[in-house]
Image (cartoon, rainbow, N blue to C red):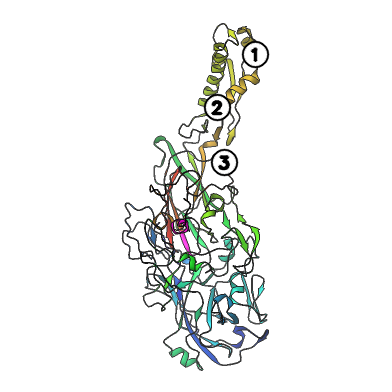
Amino acid sequence: MKKLSILALAAVGLLVGACSSDRDVAEASNGNLTQEDGDQFISLSINLPTTPQSATRNATEDDDNNYNYNSETDHEDFELNDGLAREYTVKNALLVVFHPAASGAEDDATFVGAYSIDPNWFTSSDKQVTKYSSKIVQKVGGAVAKNDLLLVVLNRNLLIDFDKDEPKFTVGSTNMLDGTKTFGDFRYSLLEATALGAGVMTGNGFYMANAPLTDKQGSTTTAITGAAIRTLVPINSVYQTEAEALASTDPALVYVERGMAKVTLQALPDGLKLGSDATKGITFINWTLDHTNIYSYAVRSTVGHESFIPLASELNGKYRYAGFTDITESGPTPYKYRTYFAKDPNYDRNVVTTAPTSPTDLPIDLSYAVNSNYTSAIGDENPQYCFENTFDVDHQTVMNTTLVRLKVQVGGGDDLYIVQGNRGEILLNDAVVTRAKNAAVDYIQDLKTAGTIDYTGTISGADFDVTVPTTAGTVSITVAKTDGTAFDAKITAGTAPTNDAIQTAVNAALADVICYEDGMSYYTIRIKHFGDQLTPWHTTEAQMPMVGDIYPEGTNRDKNYLGRYGVLRNNWYDIRVSSIKYLGEATPKDYKNDQTTDDELDGYIAAKIHILSWAKRTQNWAL
């Protein structure tokens, strides 16, 4: 896919015209809450990222994964796109300071203080940044020092309870002011808040926090070696006066990303037909997201960074973990490349409740919307949002994958039927009745041929009554003699078959009759992350997929397939259905226990998925 998850980076320079008052900060020192104990100042700027743009562009200059993309032949696009204005609205901003740990691990950095800030925002001309803040000068306490680490949170919604007057600073149920908390505690603080739903991150502006950046360029065929990753941003200098801070030329540059993934569905092509049947037009009805994660980290996890860096498909050779383009034209050095994968709390299908190395044995718990939350609203203006959902290759199966469920009407509203699983032949109710009557007649003829019975006169479809239910799903056809007395009188040898015997014979002949009530048909589209461009599915002779071995075993499975499916925060997945070959499901199937691999040898729908930066990805489906 022409993917690249464009971090919802916002080039935001936080600027406070005047220094903050003492009541703008909640600070922890030796376990006790204190007021600011010094008149120091720091400067910073915040940046909000763009998302991928037009899905039809031919140029590649905005493509952070460095594709040689041809819109006529390639199946996936990646573009940078600003998205919707409401996705950049900032209602409140919080600056959090941590002391670096002796271990050097970001998660071990200890909490120092939190400040409410009020940035002024400006539109950026940078291709990768939509908005940025002017330089923010913030008054901080004496405990803050050069090289302390900064975290910015925008639009904290109900996730963070911050009150500078109490003072109070809790993330989920984690009290950051008890004198013991670390950045790791902050990152993993939301896990106990089950069934959050992405709405908790969008209710009062879109929740954003620091984006993990790396210091090595990716998306080329050159191996990435020795790459480091950074989420927290060091304070370059601490100033004794506000004037010095205002005059500084090296503010800390903070890049943030949105806390959820974004999915849109575009209108079906005009005149879309079912396969090659010109009489079976397709009308879009509605859609929904399914298999969405209910767990999320407050800040994207960097666990697994070392194992993600060397991943490059054997078919394209591009190292997909890091971006190709500097995050801004004047970006930070050396941490200036976006990263495009992460482990979510359910990554290995266990829920991590304290730290990434301390999992409990809780099974995956996704949110299911098999028959609910459908909407007819489509297009760029009507996205749906969800938490990121990633998993290893072993769990790259339907039950683990975030889905788009699509409902369409085939034909003009008649009930449609398929028999014996043959989706290539669509019958109307009358045709099913005729087929059932013929099956009953064939049964009688077989009895005569076998010498079990004999009869005089003619036995035809008129000798049987057939009822075909019109309720969606698998249906049971009812067959009985129209006039049992008259029918039995025709039998001159042997015993006349009973209604039950005739019913059994017809059931066997017309096994698995499925009714599509009013022509309604459901489809599922498994959302791809890296998709066909960065993780092409092997079809070469050496690793030809086959039933039971869809992702051929071997040491290169992660290189070839890890991240092919899934959704990542701050990525925009734009779904475009190009064709539908066959009828799908008569009623939406519950897949929460379905271990079918995401890639299959057969399919029924063709679709493209675009991911915007938001990062926009495209994928083709043939169902």
Q: Please identify the quarter of the rendering in which residue 483 is found.
A: top right
At mark 2, the secondary structure is: loop
State which quarter of the image contains the N terminus. bottom left
Residue type marked 3: Thr
Q: Nearer the viewer, mark 1 or mark 2?
A: 2
On the image, the x and y values in percent for residue 216 come to 41, 72
Residue 422 tag number: none
Task: Report the residue at 56% width, 56% height from top.
Answer: 292
> Which of the pair 590/184 is nearer the observer?
184
Mark 2 is surrounded, within 10 Å at the Cα level, by few (under 14), some (14 to 19) or many (20 or more) other residues, namely some
Which residue: 58% across, 67% down? 297
Please say whether residue 401 is visible from this viewpoint: no
Give the residue pinned by disc 1.
Answer: 484
Q: Nearer the viewer, residue 518 or 350?
A: 350
Q: Is-magenta flag for residue 276? A: no
Label 3 vs 2, first from the N-terminus: 2
Instruction: Quote the CA–CA distance across marks 3 and 1.
Output: 37 Å
Q: Amino acid at mark 1?
A: Gly
**Residue 598, horizontal then vertical, whole percent:** 50, 50
Residue designated by label 3: 587
**Residue tagged 2:** 510
Residue 281 versus residue 545: which sits nearer the camera? 545
Amino acid type at image mark 2: Leu
| Residue 464 picture location, percent across and down | 59, 18
User: Which numbered disc flags the more N-terminal residue, 3 or 1?
Assistant: 1
Using the image, determine if residue 535 lies above or below residue 484.
Answer: below
Which stretch is magenta? Answer: 556-572
